[in-house]
Image (cartoon, grey):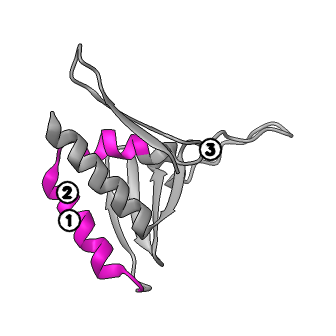
Amino acid sequence: MDYDFKKNTLDGSYHAVFSMGHEALGRWLVEEIGKDFDKMDTVMCQLGALKNSTQEWRIIGDELTLSLQDNEAVVQANYLFSEDDTELEDNMDFYDEEAVAVCGFEDFALVLTAWRAFVTRF
C-alpha cells in the first residue's frame, strides 16, 4: 500500500493520497481524524488491545466508519450500511471501489503514525 500526504499551502487543507484499493483510508484520515490527536490515541490503544483478539471495535464518523477486528482495519463509507432498496438495471452495479479499504493492524498503525507525524509538522 502506497500513500502520500500533502498540505495545500493556499487554504491549509490536508490531502492523503493512497494507492488503488486503499483510497478510503485517505478519506478517513482527512475527513474523520484530521488533527484530532485524542482520536488517534484512542485508535492506537484499540489496535494494541485487539491484537490477536476476535472482539470488534468501531468508531462511526460522519461519512466513514472504522472497524477493527481479526487483526484487520476496515474503513467503509457509511452509505454502504444503509438499507436502500434501489434497483439497478441489468448489468449495472454501484461503484464502491473507493468506499472500502482493508489492511492489517501493523500497516494501519504505521499509516496512523505517519499521519500524526505529518499533521504535527504543520
Magenta stretch prevailing secondary structure: helix
Q: What kind of element bears circle 2?
A: helix
Q: Which residue is mark 3?
A: 97
Q: Which residue is mark 1?
A: 42
Q: Say whether residue 40 is left or right of residue 64.
A: left
Is residue 32 within the magenta segment? Answer: yes
Residue 63 percent across, percent down from the top left = 38, 43
Marks 1,2: beta carbons within 8 A:
yes
CA gap, disc 1 and disc 3: 27 Å
Q: Is residue 87 above or below residue 42?
A: above
Residue 4 percent across, percent down from the top left = 41, 38
**Residue name at image x 39 percent, y 77 percent:** 56
Q: Which residue is mark 2?
A: 39
Q: What kind of element bears circle 1?
A: helix
Marks 3,2: beta carbons within 8 A:
no
Camera-nearest residue between 30 and 109: 109
Residue 26 percent across, percent down from the top left = 41, 42
Instruction: Specify which label sits upstream in the sequence, 3 or 2.
Output: 2
Q: Is residue 57 above or below residue 22?
A: below
Q: Say whether residue 93 is left or right of residue 83.
A: right
At label 2, the amino acid type is Lys
Q: Which residues are magenta?
A: 26-52
CA gap, disc 1 and disc 2: 5 Å
Residue 16 percent across, percent down from the top left = 38, 37
**Residue name at image x 25 percent, y 66 percent:** 44
At label 3, the amino acid type is Glu
